[in-house]
């Protein structure tokens, strides 16, 4: 193998040395052009990168993010002294998803940092660390709510030396949210309740939530009743639900369904109390005894007694029968009973925000698209511009009564108006457009191949050149023939002289010639 390489190297060196200076320059230029072309193609084919984080973060977090990206086969580069990462632009969304789901990018004070204290840590420092940890914990929780991209929490927690005053002091909080979509009032109220329960002595009336546009989303609990903002939210929610019902019902029958509901919601608060009384048992005058009072009294009158005086009469006393004198007795009884009849109380309270279906209305526009292609219209013998001008307006279509009845039954609204239209769509014939950017790599490759082929052909053509002797004039030809004849005569004379010397040698020394021939024959036999 080494000998083959050495041989090829020698051949290349030999061919290179045989080239002229001009040929060497051409080959050098060709090689440089090939290298430049390869570099340009490599630059054009390199993927574009996008910075993953808007702000620089800690190197330890960068290392965790790099591990997550490596596990999910995402190409990345560490930049800014290991404080940020850039990923391939096509994989940017995937990188965001994986890093967010892994939770490695949650910034702020950790529990380990909170507990890392020593003897020199003061109480104020501990309070500040507790407050910072609580803020970061709330922020990391709020960004997990759907629709919240970023969250910033500021807490004001009064610090009192007296424990009683500390328990009575009220805290406050302000929350700044960057939203990807609007939050409902229920979501804002839930955020306020969560923060209030997480911070000591914090009431929802001392919480304010705003978004990045400066709109106040929450500024304390609402008063009794339904606020105007919540009324609009309830109405929008009811209308969206109604729209979805109609779309689910007839959405597949038409290309486009446009719904415009006008729901009337009654937010009046109404409460009614009814009390019904009835007797118990068969006797309508009787019921359950709830109170009973009875009073009794009696008196009795007897005969006359002894004579008045200070002393009693001794012995038997003489009595006289009086005609008008007699004994009397009286008795009195009173009874009072209070009966309770059956009593039934009914309280009727009307829900606030109910839809008044009789006063509400609904308008539905149904649209079917009709496609017109330029190449098909040209077959009809019309120009494309004239055809579009003639058919640019929408056409009204008939609506089946069953569709209207279906919408009424699905929504409960009787006042329903349904219109149908045919919408023309004109498809122009696509012109063939060449995107030169897509063809640049192929053009460069072809150019390189042509350049290489040109250099190879140029090199081989030089090897195949045969030098042709220039044509001689007549005088030069005659001179050359004369010189050739003279040379042939000299050669003949030399041959004759050699033959004469050989004959003389044979005549003078025949024995030596015989020995020489014998030796020649012997050598041939041996071979």
Image (cartoon, helix red, strand yellow):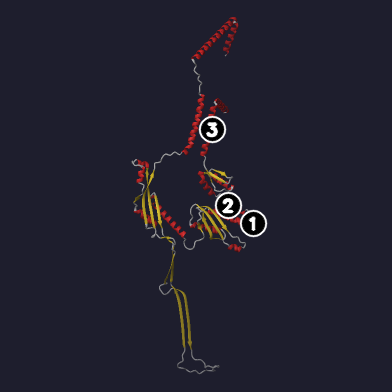
Q: Please state the horizontal and vertical placement of residue 322, each as a whole percent of the image.
A: 46, 93
Q: Please state the horizontal and vertical placement of residue 275, each as a whole percent of the image.
A: 43, 69
Which residue is under mark 3?
A: 32
Which residue appears at 50% of the width and 29% of the height? 454
Q: Nearer the viewer, mark 2 or mark 3?
A: 3
Q: Which quarter of the rendered picture does the C terminus lie within?
A: top right
Residue 328 to residue 483: above or below: below
**Who is closer to the viewer here, 154 or 189?**
154
Which residue appears at 50% of the width and 27% of the height? 458
Q: Please state the horizontal and vertical placement of residue 3, each as a whole percent of the image.
A: 57, 27
Q: Residues within 10 Å of mark 3 (few under 14, many from 20)?
A: few
Residue 462 to residue 107: above or below: above
**SS assignment at label 3:** helix
State which tag comes first along the sequence, 1 or 3. 3
Which residue is under mark 2?
A: 108
Looking at this view, name the residue that lies furthest to the right: 119
Quadrant in the picture for residue 24: top right
Gap between marks 1 and 3, in whole Å? Answer: 71 Å
Residue 10 to residue 483: above or below: below
Q: Residues within 10 Å of mark 2 (few under 14, many from 20)?
A: some
Residue 193 to residue 71: above or below: below
State which tag comes first along the sequence, 2 or 3. 3
**SS assignment at label 1:** loop
Q: Is residue 377 left or right of residue 185?
A: left
Which residue appears at 52% of the width and 38% of the height? 43
Which residue is under mark 1?
A: 122
**Who is closer to the viewer here, 447 or 257?**
447
């Amino acid at each position: 193998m080494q000998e083959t390489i050495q041989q090829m190297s020698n051949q290349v060196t030999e061919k290179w040395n045989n080239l002229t200076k001009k040929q060497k320059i051409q080959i050098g230029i060709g090689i440089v052009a090939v290298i430049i072309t390869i570099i340009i193609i490599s630059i054009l084919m390199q993927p574009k990168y996008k910075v993953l984080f808007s702000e620089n973060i800690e190197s330890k977090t960068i290392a965790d993010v790099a591990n997550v990206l490596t596990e999910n086969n995402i190409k990345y580069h560490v930049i800014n002294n290991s404080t940020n990462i850039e990923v391939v632009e096509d994989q940017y969304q995937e990188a965001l998803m994986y890093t967010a789901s892994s939770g490695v990018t949650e910034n702020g004070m950790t529990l380990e940092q909170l507990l890392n204290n020593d003897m020199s840590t003061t109480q104020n420092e501990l309070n500040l660390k507790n407050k910072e940890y609580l803020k970061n914990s709330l922020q990391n929780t709020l960004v997990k709510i759907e629709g919240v991209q970023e969250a910033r929490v500021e807490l004001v927690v009064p610090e009192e030396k007296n424990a009683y005053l500390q328990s009575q002091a009220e805290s406050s909080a302000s929350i700044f949210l960057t939203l990807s979509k609007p939050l409902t009032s229920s979501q804002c109220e839930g955020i306020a309740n969560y923060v209030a329960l997480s911070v000591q002595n914090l009431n929802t009336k001392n919480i304010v939530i705003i978004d990045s546009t400066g709109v106040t989303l929450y500024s304390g609990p609402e008063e009794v009743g339904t606020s105007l903002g919540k009324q609009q939210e309830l109405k929008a929610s009811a209308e969206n639900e109604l729209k979805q019902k109609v779309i689910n019902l007839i959405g597949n029958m038409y290309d486009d369904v446009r719904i415009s509901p006008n729901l009337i919601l009654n937010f009046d608060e109404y409460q009614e109390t009814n009390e019904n009384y009835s007797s118990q048992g068969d006797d309508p005058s009787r019921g359950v005894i709830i109170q009973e009072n009875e009073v009794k009294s009696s008196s009795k009158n007897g005969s006359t007694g002894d004579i008045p005086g200070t002393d009693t009469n001794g012995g038997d006393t003489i009595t006289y029968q009086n005609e008008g004198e007699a004994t009397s007795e009286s008795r009195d009884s009173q009874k009072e009973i209070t009966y309770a009849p059956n009593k039934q109380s009914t309280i009727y309270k009307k829900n606030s925000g109910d839809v008044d279906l009789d006063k509400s209305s609904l308008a539905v526009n149904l649209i079917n698209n009709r496609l017109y292609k330029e190449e098909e219209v040209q077959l009809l013998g019309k120009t494309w511009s004239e055809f579009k001008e003639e058919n640019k307006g929408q056409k009204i279509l008939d609506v089946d009564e069953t569709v209207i009845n279906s919408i009424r039954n699905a929504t409960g609204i009787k006042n329903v108006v349904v219109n149908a239209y045919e919408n023309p769509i004109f498809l122009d014939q696509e012109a063939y457009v060449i995107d030169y950017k897509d063809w640049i790599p192929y053009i460069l490759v072809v150019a390189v191949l042509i350049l290489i082929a040109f250099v190879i052909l140029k090199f081989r053509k030089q090897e195949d050149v045969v030098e042709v002797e220039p044509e001689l004039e007549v005088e030069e030809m005659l001179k050359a023939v004369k010189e050739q004849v003279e040379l042939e005569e000299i050669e003949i004379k030399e041959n004759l002289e050699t033959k004469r010397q050989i004959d003389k040698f044979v005549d003078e020394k025949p024995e030596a010639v015989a020995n020489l021939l014998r030796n020649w024959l012997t050598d041939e036999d041996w071979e």
